[in-house]
Image: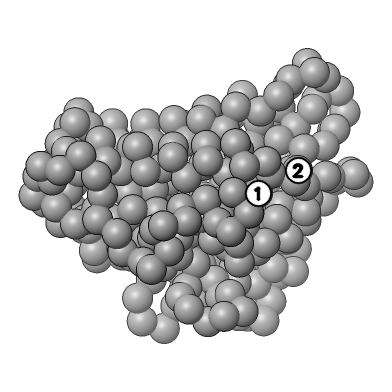
């Protein structure tokens, strides 16, 4: 009886969070049904609801945590968004492009080479959106896939971890490596809902968004804060145009014999934005 009571309470928390986030997009009945179907799992329920909010193409956002340090949904915390340095911006951009080039050249184990992989550049509008979302104290995807300029819909990757070391400095490449390593569990082919709804044993969505060939812009943010005795970090990366479309592959197969990626935007001459 106690276990059932706890489960009902957990479900109520999840339902309340999802209604607050998606209330203008889906009815409460839909939220209740999805949460019940997903066994009260917040991330699975979030992905399932987001898959319902697209009228045509469906793309799915990806999140993960490290060291089992999930960010609770409504903690009473002071969260600070880090003012990224040029070195940190370069780490995000170069960390993505180096891995995309590696894939294009056929150097990623178990994955076919990509013929159409494009170069990514930093985008301040995406970074601003990421910073606003990172400040909300939630390890939860942003259901709003739009940006003010209306140039494209956005994709999103999340990453979080905690440490008891008060002097710890974040290593951006740790998050990128964690996302990219999901390639070990991806068999090249069209994406399906089962890749994202929790029914699969492994996550692949961070990897597929990182290497989505037609995604040419990236903007990220980092927030850091204390929760109990843990110093926590949350990374939010926004991508445009978005990837992870159900029924599509992240790129076309074919080896890139060059040592560079194709430029897919007018902004390749300033890959780190105007300030760097």
Instruction: Tell me what residue is drawn at x 73 percent, y 60 percent.
Output: 132
Mark 1 and mark 2 in contact (Cβ < 8 Å)?
yes
Q: Nearer the viewer, residue 47 or 160?
A: 160
Taking the image as shown, residue 276 lies to the left or right of residue 135, namely left
**Residue behind mark 2:** 82
Indicate the position of residue 24 as horizontal and vertical percent values. Answer: 67, 81
Q: Which mark is residue 48?
A: none
Instruction: Tell me what residue is drawn at x 69 percent, y 76 percent.
Output: 23
Crowding at mark 1 (Cα within 10 Å: few <14, some 14-19, many 20+): many
Q: Earlier in the sequence, mark 2 or mark 1?
A: 2
Indicate the position of residue 192 as horizontal and vertical percent values. Answer: 29, 59
**Residue behind mark 1:** 221
Indicate the position of residue 82 as horizontal and vertical percent values. Answer: 75, 43
Alpha carbon separation for disc pair 2 and 1: 7 Å
Can I make out residue 64 in this image?
A: no
Instruction: Tell me what residue is drawn at x 39 percent, y 54 percent.
Output: 120
Task: Relative to 67, say whether 269 is above or below.
Answer: below
Task: Relative to 24, say whether 276 is above or below.
Answer: above
């Amino acid at each position: 009886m106690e276990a059932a009571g706890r489960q009902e309470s957990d479900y109520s928390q999840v339902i309340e969070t999802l209604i607050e986030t998606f209330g203008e997009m889906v009815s409460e009945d839909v939220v209740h049904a999805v949460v019940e179907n997903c066994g009260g799992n917040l991330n699975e329920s979030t992905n399932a609801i987001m898959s319902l909010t697209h009228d045509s193409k469906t793309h799915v956002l990806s999140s993960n945590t490290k060291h089992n340090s999930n960010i609770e949904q409504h903690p009473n915390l002071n969260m600070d968004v880090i003012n990224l340095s040029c070195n940190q911006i370069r780490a995000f951009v170069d960390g993505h492009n180096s891995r995309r080039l590696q894939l294009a050249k056929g150097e990623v184990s178990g994955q076919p080479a990509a013929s159409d992989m494009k170069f990514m550049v930093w985008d301040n509008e995406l970074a601003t959106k990421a910073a606003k979302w990172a400040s909300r104290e939630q390890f939860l995807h942003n259901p709003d896939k739009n940006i003010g300029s209306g140039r494209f819909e956005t994709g999103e990757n999340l990453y979080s971890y905690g440490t008891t070391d008060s002097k710890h400095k974040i290593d951006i490449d740790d998050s990128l490596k964690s996302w990219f390593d999901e390639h070990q569990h991806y068999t090249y082919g069209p994406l399906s809902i089962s890749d994202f709804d929790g029914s699969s044993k492994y996550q692949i969505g961070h990897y597929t968004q990182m290497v989505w060939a037609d995604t040419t812009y990236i903007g990220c943010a980092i927030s850091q804060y204390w929760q109990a005795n843990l110093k926590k970090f949350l990374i939010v990366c926004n991508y445009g145009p978005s990837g992870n479309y159900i029924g599509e592959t992240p790129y076309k197969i074919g080896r890139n014999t060059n040592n560079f990626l194709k430029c897919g935007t007018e902004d390749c001459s300033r890959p780190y934005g105007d300030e760097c």
